[in-house]
Amino acid sequence: MFLKVLFLEGKARKELFNKYPPKTVYISSSRINCAKNGDFDTYTSSAIAYAWFIWEKGYCGETIIKWTN
């Protein structure tokens, strides 16, 4: 899932991650511009950090965090 890094926060999500840990989280080291409805003319910059969250069915180990770009 491509989500905001803020998805890592919260007590309810902590329970989710304890029960179903993502195998890997790839955090973008630069800000990625995500434009609503592909409207990059209106949305020209991003102050939001994003990451790819990768779950593997049946995975029970520790989550690996890596950085991209």
Image: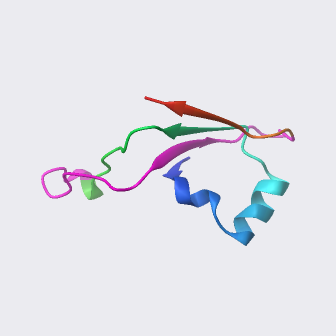
Whether residue 32 appears in magenta in the rendering, the answer is no
Task: Find residue 24 and report its horizontal and vertical position in percent.
Answer: 67, 36
Residue 7 placement: quadrant: bottom right
Whether residue 54 appears in magenta in the rendering, the answer is yes
Residue 65 placement: quadrant: top right
**Secondary structure, magenta segment, majority class:** loop
Q: How many marks?
A: 0
Task: Find residue 3 and report its horizontal and vertical position in percent.
Answer: 51, 52
Residue 29 placement: quadrant: top left
Q: Could you tell whether 3 is left or right of 59 in the image?
A: left
Task: Find residue 51 and report its horizontal and vertical position in percent.
Answer: 52, 44
- How was the colour assigned to the protein in this rendering? rainbow
Question: In the figure, 32 relative to 68: above or below?
Answer: below
Which residue, as the protein is rendered here, is positioned at the far left?
41
Which residue, as the protein is rendered here, is positioned at the far top?
69
Q: Which residue lies at the image location 85% right of the left edge and 38% below the top edge?
A: 61
For the C terminus, give its image quadrant: top left
Question: In the figure, 33 relative to 17: above or below?
Answer: above
Q: Could you tell whether 30 is left or right of 67 in the image?
A: left
Q: Which residue lies at the image location 73% right of the left edge and 70% below the top edge?
A: 12
- The span picked out in magenta is 38-60
Q: From the viewer's side, name the closer residue of 39 and 25.
A: 25
Q: From the viewer's side, name the closer residue of 36 and 68.
A: 68
Task: Find residue 47 and report its horizontal and vertical position in percent.
Answer: 34, 56
Q: Which residue lies at the image location 75% right of the left edge and 40% below the top edge?
A: 63
Q: Could you tell whether 2 is left or right of 40 in the image?
A: right
